[in-house]
């Protein structure tokens, strides 16, 4: 789950991280009033769950409250990468001398959290990572030890931070790691961490992504979830309790287990197909879950065929078959469906499917070939 910049800053502030004075606003008049209260130049910043706000014109500097209002009139309602700006953050403009980057995320390959620090922070940090990765210092953390003082010094040295930043970076990194751990984050970053003309450090921007699987431990964060900014099909899948990610292809993919579904995506693509989604029905899925999965995938009008790939362990093949037959009997399904069933009660499931318009496949590779052929010949 993503949260807005102002919400992330509110969390960081609770952990002692200095942030600019400011508040969120939803109308141009509110923006003008907040700018008047601040009493100095302000920045009006669009609040949407997407990067590149500045380049899209969603971040503007205003010298006066009247100018802040003018900027708000243009930014509110603006479309940024398909998302409509409904609120803006109005905050005191920082006297920026230098910009740095601090971030923590999960390195799945190393199976560790990784801390990153760079003296080249700001809006082009992605370009820095791609073209000059040596400018980003990286350190994997032992989960039993966390982030230690000597590691902070090591990161500051390897990132070549200037002395003024090296002296003050410790509290920011410690707070960042504490937030990351306490909120079960998949990403927490401060970009930029600004060194002001007065020599102080301040978090000029903040980003927090929270692992959806841990939200049950953070009921207070539910208020930050904004379904209107999600893909509508992903939002519907979430309401149904399904693990679904929308992609850009035309072949719907349904399987049980994240690893199996990911492999199915790869195999379909290798056969020349374009997956339309990732959908994991999980272990032990009942007929109703299967029917829901089919219904969800078909909400995408781009889908021209579905590949059902089930390796039964906890999940029973006969339950999957019942769900598929229920979907076929109650829905107007006009696309081909290829089914590969193996494992627990697979034979019973395949017997139930005999005589149906569903196309069986003995292996995942065969199923991928068949659905690609059916879609391409339609």
Image (cartoon, rainbow, N blue to C red):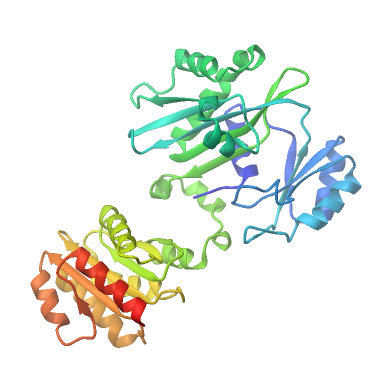
Quadrant assignment, res 349: bottom left
Quadrant assignment, res 331: bottom left
Whether residue 226 is visible: yes
Q: Is residue 233 above or below residue 52?
A: below
Q: Is residue 238 left or right of residue 117?
A: left
Residue located 65% across and 43% down the image: 6
Q: Is residue 124 above or below residue 263?
A: above
Residue located 62% across and 34% down the image: 191
Residue located 34% across and 61% down the image: 269
Q: Is residue 198 left or right of residue 168?
A: right
202 or 58: which is nearer to us? Answer: 58
Q: Is residue 191 left or right of residue 240?
A: right
- Residue 335 locus on image (x, y percent): 35, 81
Q: Is residue 275 above or below residue 106?
A: below
- Residue 132 locus on image (x, y percent): 55, 30
- Residue 317 locus on image (x, y percent): 16, 69
Quadrant assignment, res 126: top right
Count of picture labels:
0
Q: Is residue 93 left or right of residue 347?
A: right
- Residue 209 locus on image (x, y percent): 50, 44
Whether residue 242 is visible: no
Q: Is residue 47 above or below residue 150?
A: below
Q: Quadrant of the C terminus?
A: bottom left
Residue located 19% across and 69% down the image: 340
């Amino acid at each position: 789950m993503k949260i807005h910049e102002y919400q992330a800053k509110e969390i960081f502030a609770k952990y002692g991280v200095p942030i600019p004075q400011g508040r969120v606003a939803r109308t141009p008049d509110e923006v003008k009033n907040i700018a008047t209260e601040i009493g100095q130049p302000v920045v009006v910043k669009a609040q949407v769950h997407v990067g590149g706000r500045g380049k899209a014109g969603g971040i503007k500097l205003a010298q006066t409250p009247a100018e802040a209002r003018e900027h708000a009139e243009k930014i509110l309602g603006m479309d940024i990468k398909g998302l409509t700006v409904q609120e803006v953050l109005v905050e005191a403009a920082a006297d920026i001398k230098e910009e740095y980057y601090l971030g923590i995320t999960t390195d799945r390959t190393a199976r560790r959290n990784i801390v990153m620090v760079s003296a080249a922070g700001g809006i082009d940090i992605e370009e820095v990572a791609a073209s000059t990765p040596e400018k980003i210092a990286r350190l994997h953390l032992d989960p039993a030890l966390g982030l230690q003082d000597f590691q902070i010094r090591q990161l500051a040295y390897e990132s070549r931070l200037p002395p003024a930043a090296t002296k003050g970076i410790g509290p920011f990194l410690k707070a960042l790691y504490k937030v990351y751990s306490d909120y079960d984050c998949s990403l927490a970053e401060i970009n930029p961490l600004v060194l002001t003309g007065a020599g102080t450090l301040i978090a000029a921007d903040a980003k927090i992504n929270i692992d959806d699987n841990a939200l049950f431990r953070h009921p207070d964060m539910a208020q930050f979830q904004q379904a209107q900014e999600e893909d509508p099909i992903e939002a519907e899948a979430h309401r149904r309790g399904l693990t679904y990610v929308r992609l850009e292809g035309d072949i719907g993919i349904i399987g049980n287990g994240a690893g199996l579904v990911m492999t199915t995506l790869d195999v379909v693509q290798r056969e020349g197909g374009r997956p339309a989604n990732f959908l994991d029905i999980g272990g032990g899925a009942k007929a109703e879950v299967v029917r829901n999965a089919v219904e969800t995938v078909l909400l995408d009008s781009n889908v021209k065929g579905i590949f059902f790939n089930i390796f039964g362990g906890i999940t029973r093949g006969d339950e999957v078959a019942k769900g598929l037959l229920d979907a076929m009997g109650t829905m107007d399904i006009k696309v081909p469906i290829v089914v590969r069933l193996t494992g627990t009660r697979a034979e019973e499931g395949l017997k139930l499917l005999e005589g149906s318009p569903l196309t069986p496949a003995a292996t995942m590779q065969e199923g991928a070939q068949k659905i690609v052929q059916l879609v391409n010949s339609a």
